[in-house]
Amino acid sequence: MYLVDSSVWIDFGRPHPRPPSQMLRRLIEREVAVHLTGTIVQEILQGARDDVHLARMTRWLAPHRLLVPKDAFRTAAAAAALYARCRWAGVTPRSANDCLIAQFALDYELTLLHDDADFERIAIVEPRLKLA
C-alpha cells in the first residue's frame, strides 16, 4: 500500500512521465491501494490550469482513499517535531507540508511514492519512513 505525494500526481498526466509516475500508473492498473491526504489533494488541485483540468485531476484522485489523522493533534505535533529534527540535522525541508505527509506515511505504515528530494532528506532523519 502506498501514499502517493503530489510530486508524482502532478507529473502523472504529462506526455512523458518520470519513473515515479510510471510506477503510479502500474499500481493503479494492478489495483494496488493508493492513498492521499487532504494536503496532497490541495497541492495537486490548486495547480489546475482551468475548470477542465481541475475536473480531470479530480477524477484521477477521487477513487483513492483519503487518509485522515488518527489523532489530529498528535499527527500535527509529530509532523512539527519531524520538521524540527530535520532542521536540527541541517536538512530543512522546503515545505513543512512534506513533514506532514511523511508523518501520515509513518502513522499508517505506508510506503511513500514521491518525486521530491525533500523526502530523501527527511528519511535520513527518520529512518522508519519507507520510500518507493
Image (spheres, helix red, strand yellow):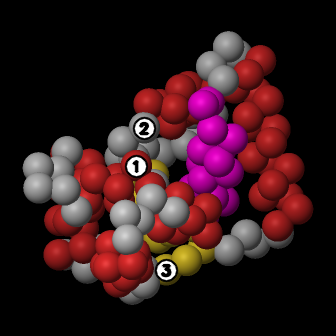
The quadrant in which residue 39 appears is: bottom right
Residue annotated with mark 2: 116
**Can you give x and y, in whole percent of width and height, for residue 71 in the image?**
82, 69
**What's the residue type where badge 2 is placed?**
Asp
Q: Position of residue 86 (x, y in %)?
A: 69, 26
What span is colored magenta in the figure? 93-108
Q: Position of residue 5 (x, y in %)?
A: 45, 54
Tell me the element at label 3: strand
The amino acid at mark 1 is Ser
Q: Provide the residue designation for mark 3.
A: 65
User: Dot 1: what SS?
Assistant: helix
Q: Is residue 39 visible?
A: yes
* Label 2, residues with CA under 10 Å away: few <14, some 14-19, many ≥20: few
Real-space Cα separation, disc 3 to disc 1, in angstroms: 18 Å
Relative to 117, 127 lies left or right = right
Front one among 99 and 128:
99
